[in-house]
Amino acid sequence: MKRVPKGDDKKLVEEEGSRYIQLGNLITKARSQEERRKVQDVVDSSLAIVEKIRQIEELDLQAKAARPKVFVFDAENILKSTKTGKSVAAAAKKRARLKLECNPAGFFQYLFRERKQVRQARHGVLLHCGLVSIRFNSAELTSLQARWQKPLVDLAEACTYVLDQGWKYLTKSEFNLVAACSRLLRELRRGSLSSVLAGVTTLSRYWELENAWLLFAVDPAYPGRAISAIQRIIELHTELREKKDYLTASLEALLQAGRTPPGPGDFVLALNVQRSRRALSLADLIAAGGGPYLAAEDFDCSELIQSEINAAIEDTAKQLALLIKKIYELNRVKNFLPTGPTNEVDYQKLKQFYCDYTGSALEQFEKETGNILPFASSLITAFLQTAEPLSYRLMKRAPANPDSKTQRHNLDYEASRMIGLIDKINHLQTILPVLQISRFLAIKTSGQGASQFESEAVSLLNELSELFFAYATKMAKLLADIPTLEAGIGLEPNQEPDQQVLEHIADRDNFITAITLAYLASAWLVNHEIQEMLRHERVLLNEKKSLLQKLERLASREQWKVLVEQLDKLQGSGMGLG
């Protein structure tokens, strides 16, 4: 006789049975071909059933973790992707080789050819050409130094402000031109001409001043670009803005060559003419093809400013991640929400669904929905009869992880709230038998005065709209968690798709239809979130473009490369970065 299990034995049998049910549910879940193969290997193994369940759940979690994470930038990886300042150091080395030294002319070459040309040159006013050597004109040199020293304090203040604030607005090239201007101002303040007047003009004496000024002679556009960048930023400073014209004129006198009276450029040229006893042009002093002399990939700034830039990169990346999440959510809704050419919602599927349920002709839809309360009650019933069986199948296939369990719980919760709304709406109809949809829209959109019962009706319909939206959103998330199975994946030639694949594809189409209906119902009831998404789509895309441009402007080339790689991963995860 078969022994009937009692007590602890019965409990063990029940536990064993529940494990087999759990294992069966895990085996039948939708997975990719590769994931199904791994699960089958576990099933075919000699492991205990508890261990099989554990390993299959672990495989599902690994598959979930392998998918790209959305909405998160690894800011630390971006900021540590390279040692900032590499291009700054490289440019500084090239600037050190910017200036060419000219071999001195012989006595007869100077006397019979170079001397006359030097005296006729515009910088010749700074020089006195003797028969054997060239000396500086002390009066002209003293006047020149007085002219350039006068505005230096105001210009240094302006450049300091621009370097403190300019990184927020300028490109790296613009900022680094201002940094070069600041270096020139520093050398001009340090560059006393007393040694020149004393006849001491060794090659190294004014080397830094010469290099600092000659940079602005490398490209004729450099002085104008530096001045323009400084003008833009000092507009933000009240006191400096009042000195804008004076500062601009002073910068032009210092940076531009060929001006009258002579400026620092004429001194640099005259200094080299005096050393070499040759008639020279600025081009003779600049090494050919030695650039770039300014960094284009990093800001040439202090460590303090660089730390502020890095903080801005991290903050902007976080803003971009949040914005991409909004765009992703918008695209997810739009993927299920049919819209017309002007972005208006197309309700044809909802109309057809409702008319099929009620048995009325499609042409009668507007009349059927004229009184919105009975329409809403019927719509809930029709939707739940269609969606609930699908949602149970969808929940069964969803991965066994905490996020999916939460979504499953919420679907049940929201469905029960919808059912509760039917009773409330039906009860309200006994007091408010007619609420025209036009009246509902007027109250909802323009805030027209409403009676107590009209306000209650609008409140219930608002709640229903939010429930439809939440139901659709969570159902869409569950659907996204389930790996897509396409007919033919992993099949041998001439092999038919198995029943599980065919059922999954058919169910997936039905899931999509149910999600679409829920979003359409929510939009029909003028859901605020959908309205805002559709209205602000262009604003979101423009804001994303602006943040990307800001990050590209602030980040070094290596930082930008890492950030773009992370963006590509987000895009590959279906975020629709657009």
Image (cartoon, rainbow, N blue to C red):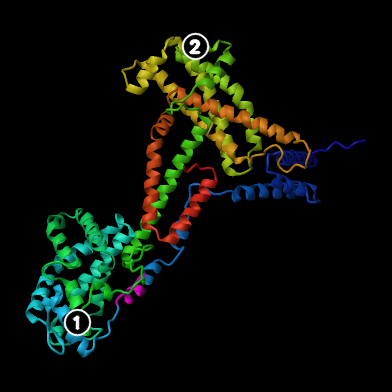
- For label 2, the crowd category at 10 Å Cα-Cα, with few meaning under 14, some 14 to 19 and many 20 or more, is some
The verdict on residue 92 being magenta is yes
Tell me where the magenta segment starts and ends, as one range.
91-99
Residue at (72% x, 45% y) in the render: 36
Around disc 1, counting alpha carbons within 10 Å, would you say few (fewer than 14), some (14 to 19), or many (20 or more)?
A: many
**Relative to 576, 225 lies left or right:** left
Image quadrant holding the N terminus, namely top right
Q: Nearer the viewer, residue 338 or 181?
A: 181
- Percent of width and height locating residue 249: 14, 61
Q: Main secondary structure of the magenta part?
A: helix
Which amino acid does the dot numbered 1 rest on? Glu
Q: Is residue 473 left or right of residue 123?
A: right
Q: Which is more toward the observer, 136 or 573?
A: 136
Q: Quadrant of residue 183?
A: bottom left
Q: Is residue 192 visible?
A: no
Residue picked out by circle 2 = 368
Residue at 49% from the left image edge and 33% from the top image edge:
333
- Residue for point 59% across, 50% down: 65
Front residue (pair 87, 81): 87
x, y percent for residue 246 = 12, 60
Helix, strand or loop status at disc 1? helix
Q: Secondary structure at mark 2?
A: helix
- Residue 29 screen position, x and y as percent: 69, 39
Q: Tell me the distance, in whole angstroms, between the alpha carbons under discs 1 and 2.
A: 102 Å
| Farthest-out residue, front | 112
Residue 340 appearing in the image: yes
Contact check, label 1 and label 2, Cβ < 8 Å: no
Mark 2 residue type: Glu
Q: Residue furthest left?
A: 139
Residue 242 placement, left or right of 72: left
Q: Which residue is mark 1?
A: 114
Instruction: Tell me residue 97's x, y (percent).
Output: 33, 77
